[in-house]
Amino acid sequence: GQSWSSITQPTGAKEYNRPMEFDKNNSLYVGNHDLFKYNNGAWIQKSNFTTDFGVSTNDPIRIVRISESNPNYIYISYSNPTWSSSFSKKIFKSTDGGNTWSDITTNLNQIQWAGITDIGINSNNPEIIYVTMGGYWYDSNGNGINRVIHSSDGGITWQDYSDGLDRFPVNRIICTKS
């Protein structure tokens, strides 16, 4: 922190309150509607979610997470609830540093009515992820459900890890080294 320098925001960025994440090589990633990488004094667009997946240009990325063990693994999320029977276009995954993306929410039916609040990546295995959600969902016994959802295969299958949690939103998750 002895010296600071200013960088401009990516072309097309509409707001300053966007998620930012550094990878272990000190490259800066910023989420706007698409993901941008700042490297060697220039911004590089790493996605085009409107063209590739039909995500509305009005939807901003809310979460950017980069694997500590393998920075080629990047997860991004749009947090807004779907408010429909569609389960897609909420969480995207890249395994090649942002060059290609896949929508990993098609089997995650818990996100249908909830906004995603955070993504945690296991520090040893980037295929193990946890997703937290807002909202006040509970089962017939009053137990919180759909608060923390887990995948051990990079988003192919999902399991609800919310058993025993109160029915309050979970806004943050941190995966510590084991």
Image (cartoon, grey):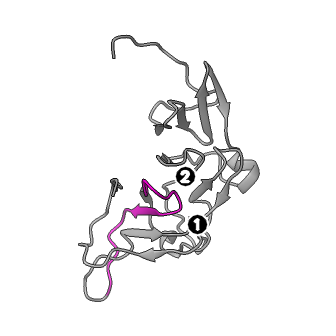
Residue at 50% over, 30% down: 26
- The image quadrant of residue 39 is top right
Given the image, on which type of amino acid does mark 2 rest?
Tyr
In magenta, the rendered stretch is 120-139
Q: Residues within 10 Å of mark 2 (few under 14, many from 20)?
A: many
Q: Residue 45: x, y in percent?
A: 67, 35
Residue at 30% over, 89% down: 140
Q: Residue 100: x, y in percent?
A: 71, 50
| Picture layout, residue 177 above or below residue 81 | above
- The image quadrant of residue 4 is top left
Rendered image: mark on residue 75 = 2
| Pair 2/1: label in front | 2
Q: Determine which residue is flagged by label 1.
A: 105
Q: Are marks 2 and 1 in contact (CB under 8 Å)?
A: no
Residue at 58% over, 31% down: 13
Query: Viewed as shown, does residue 133 lie left or right of 22?
Result: left
Query: Viewed as shown, does residue 155 lie left or right of 136?
Result: right
Disc 2/disc 1 C-alpha distance (Å): 12 Å
Screen quadrant of the C terminus? bottom left
Instruction: Examine the residues drawn in magenta and state their main secondary structure.
Output: loop
Q: Residue furthest right?
A: 51
Of marks 2 and 1, which one's residue comes earlier in the chain? 2
Is 19 contained in the magenta span?
Answer: no
Q: Residue furthest bottom?
A: 140
For the image, the number of numbered tags is: 2
| Picture layout, residue 43 above or below residue 132 | above
Q: Residue 149: x, y in percent?
A: 42, 70
Q: Residue 46: x, y in percent?
A: 67, 39
Is 129 contained in the magenta span?
Answer: yes
Query: Viewed as shown, does residue 140 lie left or right of 44?
Result: left
Given the image, on which type of amino acid does mark 1 rest?
Thr
Residue 173 vs residue 81, the one in the foreground: 173
